[in-house]
Image (cartoon, rainbow, N blue to C red):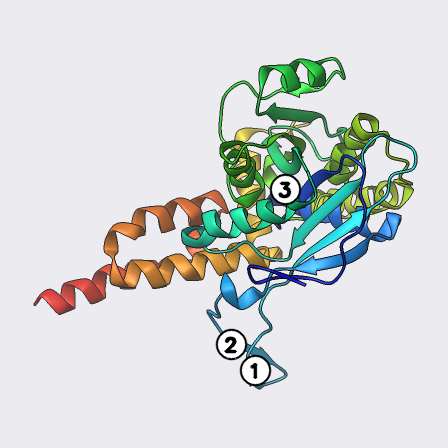
Amino acid sequence: MNMDKVKISKRPRLRNPYLIVAWPGMGEVAFKAVSYLIEQLKLEEFALIPAEDFFYLTSSLVKQGILSIPELPQSKFYYYKNKSGKNDLIVFISNAQPDLVRADAYSRKIIQVAKSFKVDTVVSFASMPQAIDHTQESSVWFAATSVELSNNLKKRNLNVLSEGAISGMNGLFLGIAKREGLKGFCLLGEIPLYTIQIENPKASYAVLKALSGILDLKVDLSGLINQAKNMEEEIGKLLDYLKMGNQVAGPISEEDIERIKNSLSQLTKLPLSVKTKIEGLFSLARSDISKAAELKAELDKWNAYKEYEDRFLDLFKKRGEKSN
């Protein structure tokens, strides 16, 4: 069965389902949490959104000297019948974020499917970069679409995000869902400022633990706990190396954070979704130089300007050459 280009393979009977959504982002908090949920609870796939409708190729891959065209990102729906709680689940996950130009239509397609199953509440996850140490527990913050929802979440001892913005699809989708008549909330897991480019299973664990309490989900989170311990050890080794020779004991300073971020940017990879977005912004800026400001902001956000500096400056050089 097709629903306006959405490919639906089956229509499960669900009881007051919540919609949970996730895309890659800082610390891979959302994507990791939902991927773990799908695997641990053995969720069943039932629908997908054809990638060619919302994604396009921006580069070729080279592996062992051989060039090839990469596969387009996947955007899939899963379902779960929650025997321990009042609400079943529909889970949507994609391994890349669409170009923001297409984000609105893409979001409405997801919402169309959700509404066909009588979903009225959406949950998303995101990261909350903070000046904390990687050995600290990850606190959970939230933002909700209504005062009523906010008051209910406050009773669970979660921190309220009173002001600010939640960037990317993990934040934007919730706003579009509210506009389309759905309610919902975003759970944000704290990550250290100097590890935004590293997968953070500790934050993914924190948001899933909070969600489990809210929706009466029975999920074995021990796998994430073990992953978090391993990642903590690896980051600790890296920090010991980077801080070698520093005689000052105590908390990491703002200067340390900047130095560590710069070092990590050389040792870690940007999420695929971020690289895709950056390439898309480069493409837009080549034809419309006003997009360069948005591109620069994105590069700064991910501490990746140095990596792209020559290409960024070439945008202006080529523009100057054309005007001569």
Q: Earlier in the sequence, mark 1 or mark 3?
A: 1
- Residue under numbered circle 2: 60
- Residue under numbered circle 1: 68
- Amino acid type of the residue that numbered disc 3 sits on in the rendered structure: Lys
Check disc 2 and report its element: helix, strand or loop. loop
Nearer to us in this view, 1 or 236: 1
- Amino acid type of the residue that numbered disc 1 sits on in the rendered structure: Ser
Q: Name the residue at 49% across, 33% down.
A: 179
Left or right of 253 in this view: 81: right
How many numbered badges does the structure rendering display?
Answer: 3
Q: Earlier in the sequence, mark 1 or mark 2?
A: 2
Q: Name the residue at 23% across, 59% down.
A: 316
Q: Are marks 2 and 3 in contact (CB under 8 Å)?
A: no
Check disc 3 and report its element: helix, strand or loop. helix
- Residue under numbered circle 3: 115
Nearer to us in this view, 255 or 2: 2
